[in-house]
Amino acid sequence: VFVSSGIRYDLIGTDEAGYLGALCTWHVSGHLKVAPEHISPHITKLMGKPGREDFDSFRQRFEEQQEGKKKRQYLVPYFMSGHPGCTIADMIELAEYIRDNHLYTEQVQDFTPTPMTVSTCMYYTGLDPCTLEPVHVPKDREKRIQRALLQYRNKANHELVREGLSVAGRTDLIGDGPDSLIPGLPGHPRKRNKRGKMA
């Protein structure tokens, strides 16, 4: 039986029973999809998801399982854009994480409200129901920009990515440098501000 998705990587713990080794040896054909969904601490907290540290730990241990294998296996992370609480600045942080860790981002999705969930409550009320604190709710063009940032390598998204980087004051990520997310345009002005939300 092959497993391609659905594992709870945050529950593996110390893995004294050798669960991950058995999984990679017998039950992963080539790709294993997991769902960290985001890496910013305040976003994963709102999502009720494990934090970045858990995902980084799992990634490292998954890579250790690849040592000595004739056929390499790959981890395919699933990320989400537009979740309540998420700003353009948060998505830029995630885009940089994707860049720095050479991740493949085919598995992306815009947040969609569904009945009877805490996230949907946040979406419609603009409040965290657990604390009653205001929560930023991205909509319309900002949602499109957030999704584009997840797939910044796609040339079709460059216009939206450029807009998002400008809004967030991160035009340092536009250009030909090793840390750039997208190439610059001839004569394109480089402006800075400190906003992470759409005006």
Image (tube, rainbow, N blue to C red):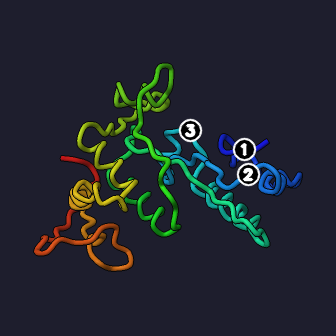
- Residue that numbered label 1 is attached to: 3
x and y percentages locating residue 41 in the rendered image: 51, 51
Dot 1: within a 10 Å radius of its alpha carbon, few (fewer than 14), some, or many (20 or more) residues?
some
Which amino acid type is shown beneath numbered disc 3? Answer: Gly
Label 2: element kind: loop
The residue depicted at 64 percent of the width and 53 percent of the height is 31
x and y percentages locating residue 184 in the rendered image: 22, 72
Query: Marks 1/3: CA distance?
Result: 24 Å
Mark closest to the chain's N terminus, 1 or 3: 1
The residue depicted at 42 percent of the width and 25 percent of the height is 121
Which amino acid type is shown beneath numbered disc 1? Answer: Val
Q: Are marks 2 and 1 in contact (CB under 8 Å)?
A: yes
Query: Marks 3/2: CA distance?
Result: 27 Å
Label 3: element kind: loop
Position of residue 1 in the picture relative to residue 75 (left or right) = right
Q: Are marks 1 and 3 in contact (CB under 8 Å)?
A: no
Viewer-side residue, 146 vs 124: 146
The residue depicted at 66 percent of the width and 40 percent of the height is 6
The residue depicted at 29 percent of the width and 78 percent of the height is 176
Position of residue 25 in the picture relative to residue 177 (left or right) = right
In this view, which residue lies farthest toward the bottom? Answer: 177
Mark closest to the chain's N terminus, 3 or 2: 2
Query: Marks 2/1: CA distance?
Result: 6 Å
User: Could one spot residue 25 in this view of the protein?
Assistant: yes
Q: Quadrant of residue 59?
A: bottom right
Residue 28 — which label?
Answer: 2
Label 1: element kind: loop
Dot 3: within a 10 Å radius of its alpha carbon, few (fewer than 14), some, or many (20 or more) residues?
few
